[in-house]
Amino acid sequence: MSADGLIGRARLLDTLERALAEGQTVLLFGPIGSGKTAVLHALARRARARGVPCAVAERTASLPDFTSALASAYPDLDTSGRTQRLARSRLLGAVEQRPPLILLDHLVVRGRALKAALKPFRGTGAGVLLAADVEHERDHRTVRELRLAYLETEIPRLHGHSMRALLRRLLVQRAPRRPLAPSDLAELVTAAEGLPGRAVWFSEALSREEGWSSDRPRVDWLRSEAVIRGAERYRADLTR
């Protein structure tokens, strides 16, 4: 477990933190539910604890998403009433004085405008992390063709013991409707396929009656619902 409470992510967080502290631009990619958002928020907490300005975009589909996130790292800087270009120009000055950590989640690929917007901030000492949902190799190729990042890191799936520890912690927090047998827990670990987001969904569903059939968790249904929900969110992100 990392110091941030994330199970199975200590090495990844340390690696990303070092690269970002060097002013690198990093692409973090992986499927829906692999825990990219949790990693970004852990990095943000670390940066703020060190007094580093931190910009977080919950979704990155346009230049306003980027500009708004960057402005949030410098709340004392007035960028209201200005065009996107002028706002970014003022923010660039602040970045050069106090380099931030810029965390751009749920990158939605729409043209090359973001690449042009990021270019002036390179070499300023600002660390930039872009997180992209990559469900298929074609998604990875699409993101890579934009050449937004110098480094790429695929978020690893959690190993069995880490997933088991995560599930146990989540189940304690959410209190399942019935006791869970060790064999049921083992089935859930397998069904999660190393994706922390599935563990979260499993624990939520098992706190409700719909997650159970008699005294056994509906493991096949839980897995199927997790896949469907992930696919729906992925499509929604692409069409919003």
Image: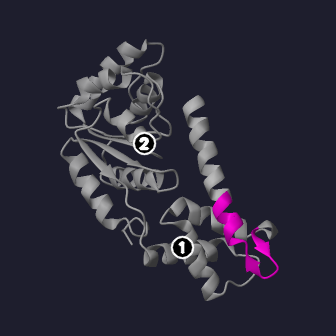
Task: Name the residue beneath numbered marker 1.
Answer: 190
Query: Can you tell which mark lies on residue 132?
Result: 2
Q: Is residue 165 above or below residue 8?
A: below
- Taking 57 as reference, is 14 left or right? left
Which residue sits at x=35%, y=20%?
88
Marks 1 and 2 sit apart, C-alpha to C-alpha, by 25 Å
Q: Amino acid at mark 2?
A: Ala
Residue 52, x across and y down, in percent: 30, 45
Name the residue nearer the viewer: 10 or 232: 232
**Magenta residues, as a range?**
211-224
Marked residue nearer the N-terminal end (1 or 2): 2
The x, y position of residue 58, in whole percent, is 50, 40
Q: Nearer the viewer, residue 183 or 106?
A: 183
* Residue at x 71% of width, y 85% of height: 179
69 in relation to 195, above or below: above
Determine whether label 1 and label 2 are within 8 Å by CB. Answer: no
Report the side of 173 relative to 128 (left or right): right
Examine the structure image and report whether residue 217 is included in the region drawn in magenta: yes
